Image: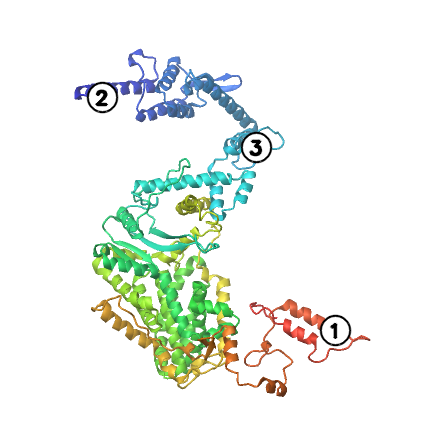
Amino acid sequence: MSGESQGREASCQAEESVSWKQCIICQSDDDKKGVLVQHPKLEYYGLVLQAVQERASLNDGDYVQDDGQQLYQVRTENAGKNLKEAVERSHNTALKTRLNTCISPDACEENMVNTMTPTDKEKEENSMKTIYKAAQVIRKSFATFTKERNVLQVSSDITDVPAELYTMIHWIMVGPAEKLETEKRTRVVDRATLTNPQVLGLALTIHHDTRNKKLMNLLNAHGYSVSHGRALLMETALANAVVENTRAHQGLYVPPFLRKGTFVFFAADKTDFAKDTRDGKGTTHGTITAVYQKIDPSKEPVAEPLIIGDAQSLSVTPYHTVIMQANQLRKLAVEEDHPTVITFDMALYEKVVQLLDAKPDLKKMVVPRLGELHVVMAALRALGASMENSGIDDAWMEADVYGPATTRQILKCTHYKRALHAHIYSYVALYEMALEEFFKDNAQLKYVCLKATEGVEAACSERKDIKAESVKQVNRTLLEATAEVITAFQEWEEQKSQHAMFKAMMSCLHRVETILFFVAATRNADLELHLQAGEALSKLFFAMDRIKYKRLWPRYIADMHDLRINHPQTWEELHAGNIAVTKSVIPFVSVGADHACEHLNKLMKIRSGIIGISNNANARQRFVIVTPELSRLSKEFKSQFDMEADRTTEHHELGPSAVKRAHATIDKIKAAILSHGNPFTTEGDKLYNVITLAYIPDEYVPQILNADVTGQKLYEDYVSERINGDVSLWAPVKKVNNKMFLSGNKKITVKLRDNTVDLKETKDLFARLMVLARSNRDINQKEAIGNYEFTLTPRALFASNGTILPCHDKSKLINLLEKLTREDVPHEDHQLPQAGSTTHQDAMDTGFTDTTSTDQP
């Protein structure tokens, strides 16, 4: 098209626009205005609506009575005709609908129907007339309803609004009834019409949380959700939307929440589903990558929201490796301003470091991090190895706080939260015993501490709105007041450390302190404290032979320090709190990226999630792809009901019940240890188990007492040789084999056919019995049985110190006592049971049945 023709067309269009504007606004019958345009621009729709609204507000018309209804008519016939022609010639349904909304009921029935519907569509015209008639009926019912009540309430109760209005809205939302009942509303509806957001959201939420087909079909039968089959179709459609997202980004899935210009960091972990198969094969394993970014609605999103279409067959473009995926996402978010910061557990971190060492170009773009959760678990395992058989673990069982199986869990840290709490309880109990002895030697300092703690107690009892600030203020005062006390305690500790038991207990406390500092750094997202506490943990890893952490933990600390020089902007982002994931406004609740990744991993392992579909490639693929997005939809659906409104606004470990339980547990552990003596008052060079009082061999005492010094020296030598020196990082790492408390346990060599097995005395009952049986073969059983009398009461009823164990089952004890009482009543043919009789023996044997209960008689 030539430039001249384009100019003529633009001029013509401008003239038509002027004619449209003048004709609609003035509403005159002046024929000189010209004809109306066929297709007006969108910007003039507003002028049409504004003109109609102005006429209604200025009363530029008259109300007339027509069959009992008030209708509004324009004063000039030509004005109404021009408005009608403008709408008809626009051929735009949206314009017709908006005009109808504005002029209703400001025009007569004929004008409204003609305005909204083309004259050549008789079927649609009849439908519009039906809707208009229904609207007339409802408006008429308003007049009668408001006369009786003088007010119209908006609620879900049929008695608060006209029945006609309630019924129409109900039919629009859930479908028309098959038959109309005047007294009772029918529940028979067309299930195919249940497509409103509420029923879809409920169905997808139930499907995500339970995967229960029967439950979903039951809710569908009552009209609350769509069927299970429909939910599966929606799930497939959502999976297809995710796949379309990956196709738009060359096989990479970009989450809809990711925004440009905001720092982003990652975490990756393996996910496996513990599905038991007959041959052990066919199990499902995968890798999950989590993306974390602070919420900033002002920034532009990287990808468009997911568009859910029809459910089709699913096909997925193969994904790139985890590192390359994270690298591409980082470029989309922050381009080249930052490297890719991604967190792994130790198994994956080792492989990534090897990969980066082999590819120097990739090393400049990626900063791998070790996950805080896995580091703390490794430190807790090392701590458990250092204190096993010291008596602290035996105190947990004797105080009836933990059982033998749970104690093994704690020492091996197979249960993170339980292990951390157990060591905190022991830490507080031991420190209380140490402080009691300290204040005996420094009585004048006790008053200083008591006076300072009074202010803390008063601040904690204030109202919640002023408690936080008051606690901060008195905490600063407490630290200033106790500075002298802390200095005196350190000098007292150094003086008392010449005694073996005191030094061993204080070393255990300092190890727990280091771990708690590292946890606090994560909870507060404090990078500086994270590196300081992490470096202090190194001596524990080296002393207790945590081989992989001995090799790679110094490398991690060095890489993080180098980040300050090589990538200062990234260092500032991590220093600002992006080292941890914060999901709540409550203080001290941040978690490491790997810990948050485990939370996401748990969503993948939902109840009945992959059961029955692991061998179906298409269903398995759909499940893995759609679960994160389905989880997000489920969370958003629940949020609209304010289900977490009653959630506490303070830390979960500060609740009254949690504090009470913690104090009770600490008191039990402390009482169990003190019943065998205070280890902080023991003098000399001997070490012993604080519960069994069994002495540790003298050759192991120096290694136990100097473990921290040995570990620190090994760490410093390793850094100088491998981090700052020429020795390869991947050269073999030697074990130290420090002998700790457990090394003093008895060992027995047992010959089994052609092999010999070393049995070591542990807390396992079988191992103890085997050691006992093999170590007492020189006893002549015939002579022992003939010369020694058997006891009448079982030895299992008594503790090691000779006291009888308490009965923890009240109901059985009361039943047995009542039974004995009835049997003691004299009868003619009744004889009292003899000593050692079956009745007495049964009572004693069944009186101690449940050792896990904390209820005391």
The answer to which of marks 1 and 2 sits earlier in the sequence is 2
Which residue is outermost to the right? 828
Q: Residue at x 41, y 25 (%)?
A: 97
Local packing at callout 2 (Cα closer than 10 Å; few below 14, some 14-19, many 20+) is few
Kind of residue at disc 1: Glu
Residue 831: percent from left, percent from top: 77, 77
- Image quadrant in which the N terminus is located: top left
Location of mark 3 (residue): 149
The alpha-carbon separation of the residues under discs 1 and 3 comes to 77 Å
The answer to which of marks 3 and 2 sits earlier in the sequence is 2
Which label number is shown at residue 823? 1
The alpha-carbon separation of the residues under discs 1 and 2 comes to 115 Å
Comparing labels 1 and 2, the label whose residue is closer to the camera: 1
Kind of residue at disc 3: Arg
Residue 223: percent from left, percent from top: 54, 38
Local packing at callout 1 (Cα closer than 10 Å; few below 14, some 14-19, many 20+) is some
Task: Tell me whether the residue at label 3 lies in contact with that at label 2, contact meaning CB atoms closer than 8 angstroms.
Answer: no
The answer to which of marks 1 and 3 sits earlier in the sequence is 3
Is residue 424 visible in this depiction of the protein?
Answer: no
Location of mark 2 (residue): 10
The answer to whether 723 is drawn above or below residue 840 in the figure is above
The answer to whether 482 is drawn above or below residue 327 in the figure is below
Closer to us: 28 or 406: 406
The chosen color scheme is rainbow
Residue 385: percent from left, percent from top: 40, 72
Comparing labels 3 and 2, the label whose residue is closer to the camera: 2
SS under mark 2: helix
